[in-house]
Amino acid sequence: MKLPYYPGCTLKANAANFEEAAMRVMKDLGYELQEMKDWVCCGTVFSMTNDDLMLQLASIRNLLRAEEQNLNELVVLCSMCYNTLQRAKKFITEDEESLDKVNDLMYKENIRYKGSVDVTHLLTVLKDRITFDRIKEKVEKPLSLLKIGGYYGCLLLRPKEFAIDDFEDPTIIEDLLSSLGAESIVFPYRLECCGAYQTITKKDVTIKRTYEIINSARKSGCEAIVTSCPLCAFNLDQRQKETAEEFIEFEQMPVFYFTELMSVALGGGWDKSWSKLHYADPEPILKEKGLI
Amino acid sequence: MKRIGVFICHCGINIKGTVDVEKITEEIADYPGVAYIENYIFMCSEPGQKLIRDVIIEHKLDGVVVAACSPTLHETTFQDALEEMNINRHQLEVANIREQCSWVHTDIEESTRKANLIIKTAIEKLKLNESLTPIFAPLTKRTLVIGGGIAGIQAALDIADGGYEVLLVERNPSIGGHMIQLSETFPTLDCSQCIMTPKMVAINKHKNIKLYANSEIESIEGFFGNFKVRIKRKPLYVDPDKCTLCDDCTAVCPVVVPSEYDEGLTWRKAIYIPFPQSIPATFTIDTENCLGFNPIACTKCQDACEPDAINYDMKPETFEEEIGAVIVATGFDLNPVENMAEYGYGKYPDVLNGLQFERILSATGPTGGEMFRPSDGKVPKEVVFIQCSGSRDPERHLPYCSRICCMYTLKHAKLYKHKVHDGQPYIFYIDIRSGGKRYEEFVQQAVSEDGIVYIRGKVSRVYREGEKMIVHGMDTLTGKKIEIEADMVVLAMGIIPSADTDKLVNILRLNTDENGFLVEAHPKLRPVESIQSGFYLAGTAQGPKDIPDAVSQASGAAAKVLALMSNDEISHSPIVAIVNEDLCSGCGICVDTCPYGARELDIIEKIATVNDVLCEGCGACISVCPASAAQQKNLTDEQIFNMIRIYTNA
């Protein structure tokens, strides 16, 4: 079965491992993520900064493209893209006047956007359509003995209208990890902010967040953490270098995308090239548990 | 034709500011039926009323229209004035030109035109008004009080002291409500038990009070002044006359259940007495948990009971009682901590709600009043109190303020400090609401003497790390994020109506607000009555309140009942439905429509009838009657059509 898929920029670059693993996993589960044509930037943080319609255009244009291609849904992997597209959808579907204005601004487009496109995160597809029970049946290499914490950050859960799960006490990532056979651990900082775009202008803020989040996970017994957000992954993984320079006692911890671990568990294996996109080397722990 | 006097009130500038009263006076002077017209600054004042009385004699009036404020405000005032002049009170009509005209419009010309029409419709209605006399019905001088907490107890005692019989129904095995669970009470710190238990004993001993504990209301029928109520008493399975309270049964009972009295902090047996001071003082068996209902499984308590008081075969009993009035005092529950994901859904033993902390503070509680925390029995050295837990949060939790939490949290922190001198209490708050008498002084004293740290802000998350509870919060005054490693956290959970209030409300046919609290007849002027005649409200069932307010409201409700009981009959408005027997086909639609049970079918005559005493004159049956056989007195179809004609022809 084919699912219309919106990748977003990072999945073609820094988070290529996230996408590749997703493709493999979905194939194993009998689905195909079919990339939509002519997609553009999701709007990222700019679309969230204020209510200026102009700043929503990039996000909305993606929805318009989808409508143009007769797609009524976009499946998204990146938490940021999920959030911006959802916000854009809400922004114009709640208010006809805004929709009109946006369409006027996009007067050179061939169609006027009607607001018919839904945005779904892959985790929701796994939970509701494929179901974790089915995934459990498909597991070839259970991630047994792997103690792992799910890290949500903010974009999957806030604002609460788009939360993919209970926004105060989500379990969707933990449930997925459990179905893969891992020992999933709920750690206190799993919903905290990773520092987001402060990583560009105020690196020290992100370093402190990374230090606190990774330490919280370690204190709770995690050996690794899992995320669905390339920005969180960047801050929590790549920034471990600076974190270790800042805090001498800091110990590294691998940060996975959930699709990578799914690939390992469902028999798709681990691609060496993925390791290069990680800062904290994920291979030792996978080898230690006999998973690769 | 009736000689009608029209009196237009300026209501200061409330009406005159937007309605040209002089112009209307001129316009209506010649309207058919109008014998006299006048305007005056305050019609409701004594000079205004005197004007009406004088004109009635001088101009030989048969009816009066007062154009002024809403009839809910002063209709009776003017009706009394008419009655003084020997004119039937139903020959008065109020034309509401304030709430329905001057207050809601700004254009003088338009509102003057509208006021003119409103007055004319009132004149048209008055022309066909009949003179009516009130309906009288007998009164049963007994009162049912539902709920045996402090409000119900106070109301029952006040009425019983006034010499009238009271039935007090409590659903739990003992009366006492939540107040009996409390340690000390703010702002005086007097012991709750010490002031509560004498009242409970008084209930038991009072010759005018009949106590139905372990009982619930099954149904109520009849009408104001003459209700019939069915009370179902659940069996105790222990004969109170034989039971000597020796406690031998609990020693042998193998079943342990979380104690309701100790808010789950301790355990009780399946055979138990809720607490030593219980009224009525007797043991009871909790059938949901007892094994003895299968005698093969267990008869340990029965075997151990020397006076042979235990009987598994007791059956529920139903009593039918006649009463004249009802006071509803069903109280509150705390909003469950299980609703608060951010504070751990109640899964951490050292995160307590306010009532649990009361039990720890209480001399009769699980720790005998010593300060130990539940998880490991250690003395908590740092305690975080979180006010407005799940309150004042319309997006996710309760939208309202529960009124008592600011004060009880402060009291908690203060009592904690009295027990743990080197301990540190922190209170997270949004505001400090200390509006009661001597409350602010209590706050100031505690802040200056007890070293309580107040932090203005909310707590975003509480989680456990090792032995500590980590509290993440925000100090909104400094804008800094705060993290406290606490030994214990106390959540000031708000008040919600007690469980099953909604079911009882259905049985009694009362109204509740959007939060489930009972609705009073008027928020300011009739706060202790329901809009349903014969029902009175007391305590937290009507809305969050503290002990002094609950007691005041209970005494207020009791005073209303005593005033009622001092009459030999009840009087009822004669504005009721009537049936034109020639037109009625006996279809029965009105019977199904009537919300008051006032309509019945006379099977022999095949017509619908009206019970005058039950009918509240709402008009529902009149609007559904397909044959127009149902009419309302003084609001007949003819009157309504005349009014519409005048209003729309203009």
Image: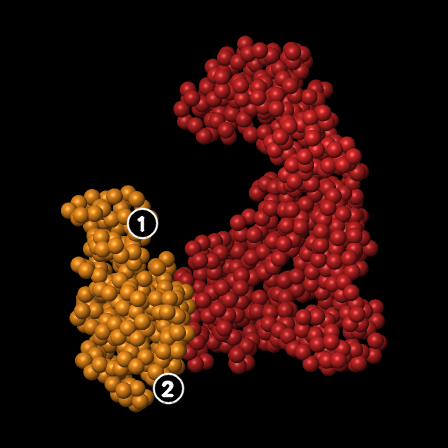
Chain of the residue under the numbered disc 2 shown in the image: A
Q: Find numbered disc 1 in the image and state the secondary structure of the residue it sits on.
A: helix
Specify the label residue A145 is tagged with.
Answer: 2
The one nearer the camera, A236 or B157, is A236
Whether callout 2 and callout 1 share a subunit is answered yes
Above or below, B434 against A102 in this view is below
Residue of label 1:
A93
- Would you say residue A7 is visible in this rendering? yes
Q: Residues within 10 Å of mark 1 (few under 14, many from 20)?
A: some
Q: Amino acid at mark 1?
A: Thr
Above or below, A244 against B418 in this view is below
Which of the image's four quarters has the N terminus of chain B? top right
Q: Residue at x 70, y 70 (%)?
A: B287
Letter of the chain in orange: A
Residue B616 horizontal/vertical position (percent)? 66, 35
Letter of the chain in red: B
Q: Residue at x 68, y 34 (%)?
A: B587
Residue A236 horizontal/vertical position (percent)? 26, 75
Residue B613 horizontal/vertical position (percent)? 73, 36
- Would you say residue B438 is visible in this rendering? no
A226 left or right of B198 in image: left
Above or below, B442 against A99 in this view is below
